[in-house]
Image (spheres, rainbow, N blue to C red):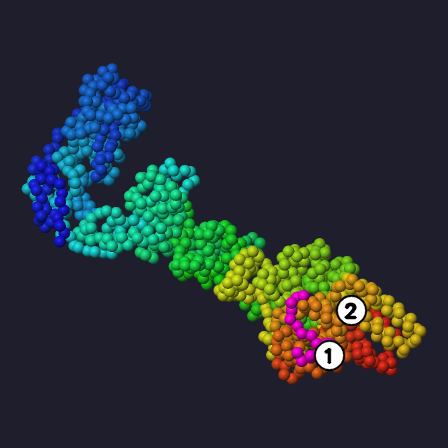
Amino acid sequence: MQQPRSRPTTGDDPPATPEDDGIATPAPLPGAWRRALRRGARDEAAHQPARGTPGNGALGFFLELVAEGHGLARLEAAPVLLSRADQGHARAHPLDARRLAHAGLAAGEQRLATAVLGLPHSQRKGRNYAQLAGAVGDGLLADMLDQGACFLGGVAGLRLARGQPETAKWRWEVLVDGDQRLSVQLPGGQRAIRVGGLWSLDPERAELAPLRDSAGICELLQQPPLSPAQARAFATALPGSALAGQLPPPTIFDPPRACQPAPKSVLTLHALTRHPRLEAGVPPLAFARLAFDYGSARLPSRGGETLVRRVRNGKLVEISRRRAEELAAMERLESVGLTPVVDCEGLPWDVAEVLPEDAWVFPGAGASGALEVNTPARWLALRPRLEPDGFVFDYAPSFPFEVLDEAPRWFVHAALDKRRDHFNLQLGIALGDERINLLPGITEALAEGQFQLEAAAGEAAEGVWYAPLDDRRRVPLRLRELRALLLPLAEYLDRPRGVIRLPRAQAGRLGEIEEAMPAGGVVDAPASLTSLASRLLEASDRASDAAPAGFVGELRRYQHEGLRWLNALAEAGLGGVLADDMGLGKTVQLLAHLLALQEAGALAHPALVVAPTSLIPNWQAEAERYAPGLRQCVVHGAQRGPALGQVGDADLVITSYALLPRDIKQLKRHRFSLLVLDEAQLVKNPRTLARRAATSLRATRCLCMTGTPLENHLGELWSQLDLAVPGLLGDERGFRRHYRVPIEKHADADCQARLNRRVAPFILRRSKSDVARELPPKTEITRHVSLGGRQRALYEQLRQSLADELREVIAERGIEHSGIVVLDALLKLRQVCCDPRLVKLQAARGVQASAKFELLMHMLPELVAEDRRILVFSQFTEMLELIASELDRRRMRYVMLTGDTRDRAAPVRRFQEGKAPLFLLSLKAGGVGLNLTAADTVIHYDPWWNPAAEAQASDRAHRIGQDKPVFVYRLICSDTVEQRIEALKARKAELAAAVLEGGGSRDRLRFDADDLDALFEPGAR
């Protein structure tokens, strides 16, 4: 049972008894209340003489209200001498006893001023203010209002008149703990003034009116409130007292009900904004005050009784505080780095003394460290650490931020720009009818490191970030939801911005954002953007995969699918990357696509193909073979001026990466329906001249063709996609940060999946294993390559000199007896085609360039990257040695078999076991007798015009036991003896055998003049 509390006694109070604090038993009343019950209220007579009108030099009074608490104010007055102007009283001069005799006032005014000046007074504002109190004060106030001009707030303020007396109305104000205080009840806007009795100030009517029956009661207004027990005693004594009928009885409460609710820790954030130490530009000093909420009672953390009485729903309850839980909450504050200000040594004394004793701060370091660390922004970061422990946060008006608890609704707004090739995107939240774009705050927070796009180690699963809505308001956002919305835009968030501008090709990101959107969120965007993915699918459904009428040849099933994909991209107005493995017919698919565009009337301007120099003859030959209806224009060679003038009249323009920068001025004059970059990995470096030239062309779309879209790192993929679909993956720096590093260094599977999804519509890649069932057992492919530069000059020099020599020999001996000379001449020309380093002549020294060698070294890394197993055949052992030397330099694994190899089984075993992907073989040593079924690719470096010998070499891989399709590549130098003899071999098989095998008899070797002219015909320049 609670022990009774002691209280001081006065001479009018009897000694306290144990029952005094009970409620059921009336408690003895304090003396002032007992005296009031005995004597009642004496209402002073109201004086209402006629109101005087001051003349020149009239008496006036300045009135001041001084608050006394409990809604009461006392009144102070200062007499002044008023001088009249045309528009009323213009000036007021102070009056004191020395000036009064010379003021020229009437006798009655002098007596009134003298009476006021005779009261105790204090001086301020240059005047003597007297306090009006007691019955004398009531009388003087009435005379002042009647005889003088009374101003509240000076001459420019409110001039008051005396109102009609009113009867005072009283009420009992119930305090939070059940105590009750007597107060006067006035209409709204009026104020109670205590003099002797009470007066009411009515600002609306500019009147001061006395309240009747208040003189004896108003002193009770400032008495301590009655406890519930005392209120019961007063209510019992009131009916038989002098106050009966004047005061209402107080509320009578039943005995309190005991309760012990769990406390809730409430941290109210404040800020000290004005102090000499807080110089301009220094953030306010933030601090917190801890309280405990026990249901209806919020109790301070420091001090206070263990038992607390409160009124709840009109009933008294008695709350028992849980001190152990309160102490645990304080310890939790200390665990996050806070300390009570009374124990903080990091605050200057003059700052600490103006903070409340129950304030908590971060201590900081040094004499004024707390001033530096207690910034409002740091305190916001404290909330997510304490809320999981049940802490509730409030924000005082002095604190510069306020955290809203209203659940936000996310929105994304996207709009096309004027050119309609980009769109602008905003990301934000809606609160009620208000929409707020959060991108400025988000990008600034990321730049400042307030949070990261990847969760930090040890971060709470439900971590939040407080997003700024304006200078004050903040809203907590779940980092998990926020990051999911931001990841599709990651590479565009590296600098503060209010709107993100994206290429139209990236409209697919809107779908990613929509999938990550929390419940209730919306994506507001034009249908032309949100439907991009569906439009691609629809275009793919509508696009034809049928070979166009002008196409000569047959397409395999996967090539039909590639044609459909290319046609769908064209219909959607987009580019892409055709990345099929080498040998699957990328060129054929592209030519079929160009014919389809031509037949549909969509090839309004030429298509420009840019390829490596070595592949230009291959493009030219493939176009002539499969798409003869396309008007070709080959921009190649030193004498290409006329071709540049025919670009506008062609359907297909072919040029090289080497010449593109040189001819860019002429090419930029034309518009191209399509730009095709063959072997696009060659321009993966954004800083090359060829790449810069390609991006400056006026092309509606761009297609990249490559068998190796990714050789070393993801940056190569970005490079090619940025050519085909500009902006799809952002800039290079952002791609490296947000994709390469997470995927390549951290094996981030989510990031990899996001990248795969983003690029999937724009890349078509099929490997040989994917389409193995559609491939024939053996696919033969001829790759044409052009000689250039010094190699072409050497060839032409030898061709001309050897041709002249042959004519002299034939004229002297006859053609029948000149076979050895012919074979020697053809050998030298074939060696120039393979590599000038094979030619043992003075003219060949210093010629290092070899077009065929470069083509081979371009093909091999690509094929190895595709996990191919490759046989490379050559008739020249020295050529194989040159190839081996270059493979050594590139650190590519290989084995070699020539006539000098003693242990033939060792290289075969290593190759068959997969220890080396490359096998270099000479014709005589490896053309027969070997079973190399591990191989699936055969390259004939120098052609064998004896079909049987070539087939035997190819059959080292294509034989029983082979379970994979075999690709056979034959490398032919265009406009050379290689191409000439290939044309003759069908009708001159005997001649071909004699030339290549060197064993043809004179009888079998039969030349005529036309044959020699064909073999030694000049090449195109």
Left or right: residue 549 compared with residue 428:
right
Q: Residues within 10 Å of mark 2 (few under 14, many from 20)?
A: some
Most extreme residue toward the bottom, as rendered?
Answer: 960
Residue at left offset 29%, top offset 42% = 356
Most extreme residue toward the left, as rendered?
Answer: 240
Q: Position of residue 184 (x, y in %)?
A: 18, 39
Taking depth in this image into account, of 225 and 902 the one nearest to the observer is 902
Mark 1 or mark 2: which comes first in sequence? 2
One can see residue 758 in this view: no
346 versus 131 height, above or below: below
Task: Give the quadrant of residue 279.
Answer: top left
Q: Position of residue 772 (x, y in %)?
A: 61, 77
Residue type at mark 2: give it. Leu
Q: Which residue is mark 2?
A: 838
Q: Residues within 10 Å of mark 1 (few under 14, many from 20)?
A: some
Left or right: residue 39 compared with residue 539:
left
Q: Which residue is mark 1?
A: 925
Is 904 a magenta residue?
A: yes
Which segment did they paint magenta? 889-906
Query: Circle 2 sits in a helix, a strand or a loop, which is it?
Result: helix
375 versus 623 height, above or below: above
One can see residue 12 in this view: yes
Task: Give the quadrant of residue 709.
Answer: bottom right
Taking depth in this image into account, of 93 and 543 the one nearest to the observer is 93
Query: Circle 1 sits in a helix, a strand or a loop, which is it?
Result: helix
Q: Position of residue 781 (x, y in %)?
A: 70, 74
